Image (cartoon, helix red, strand yellow):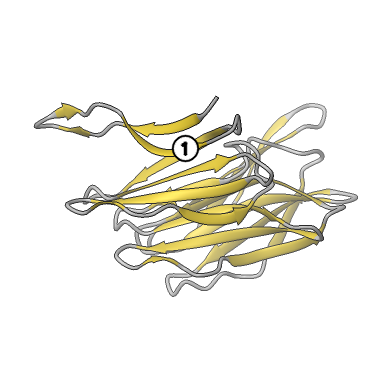
Amino acid sequence: PNYFLCFSMYTPLTGWSWPETLAGNWGGNIMSNHQVGMSDNGSAVVSWIAYGWEDHVYSRTFIADFGWGDTFDHGQTASINSKEYRLSVNGNGDAILAHESFNSTERSVAVWTYHAGSGWDAVPEVLETVPLATDLYYVKAVLSDSSRAAAVWQTIDSNYRVMVSTRSVEGVWGAPEEIDDAGTWDFTTRVGIDDSTGEFMVTYSKFETPYTNTYYS
C-alpha cells in the first residue's frame, strides 16, 4: 500500500475544499503524527513523520496567495509519535519544530526555526546531545508572538531528569537546566511561555506514590 497525507482548507466564503494530497510515502512505509500550525494572516505549517529505512520529520509551509512550498526534510528522528515532537507556529507565521534527532552515535534535542517569508534555517539549534545509551523523551516546545520560546524534555540515564531551555526575543537559546527528577519517564510534559516577560511554566506528572501533578515556573 501507499500512504498519503491529505489536507482540506476552510474559508468563510467557500467552506471546506475537497481534500488534496500534500505528501506521500511508498512501498508500505507509513506516515503519521502530523501537526498543523496557522498564523493570523492565513499562512500555515504542517509537519509529519515518514517511516522507512530511516524515520524522518518533514514539513511543508503554506503562504496565502502563493500556495504550498516544497517539502523540507528536518532529518532523521527518534521521535516516533506525536507526543515526542512539537511544531509551534506564532501569529506572525514564524515557527519552531523540536524533536529528538538521531544518528549512529548520539541523540540530540534539535529545534528548527522557520522565518516567515524566508524559510527554515539551514541547521537546527541543538539544545542537548547525549550518547545512544542515554534516552531523550517527549520533546515539547512553544513559540510566542514576540519570538520567545521554551522547550522541555526528559534526559534519562541513571535518573529521569526534566530539562528546560528558553529562548530570548533575539533568538538565543539558553543552556539546558535540570528542574526535577520526575521519578520515571513521562509523556504528559507541557510548557508555556509569557509573550512579554519571558516567564515560563512546565507541568508534568510525577509517577511516585501518590501520583502528583507538578508545575515548575
Residue ID for mark 1? 24
Q: Find residue 66 and report its horizontal and vertical position in percent.
A: 21, 54
Which quarter of the image is occupied by the N terminus? Answer: top right
Tell which residue pokes out farthest to the right in this image: 158
Question: SS at mark 1?
Answer: strand
From the viewer's perspective, tell me whether residue 1 is left or right of residue 79.
left
Is residue 151 rendered to the left or right of residue 65?
Answer: right
Residue at 61% from the left image edge and 62% from the top image edge: 165
Q: Give me the residue at 43% from left, 52% from top.
A: 71
List x then y, in percent, for residue 158: 90, 50
In the image, what residue type sits under mark 1? Gly
Residue at 30% across / 28% down in the picture?
Answer: 19
Q: Quadrant of residue 74?
A: bottom right
Q: Is residue 193 visible?
A: no
Mark 1 neighbour density, 10 Å: few (under 14) some (14–19) many (20 or more) = some
Please report the residue visible at 45 percent of the width from the left and 32 percent of the height from the top.
4
Residue 162 falls left or right of residue 126: right
Whether residue 60 is visible? yes
Q: Residue 69 location in percent, x, y?
A: 33, 54
Front-lying residue, 202 or 81: 81
Total numbered circles: 1
Q: Percent position (x, y) of residue 146?
A: 36, 63
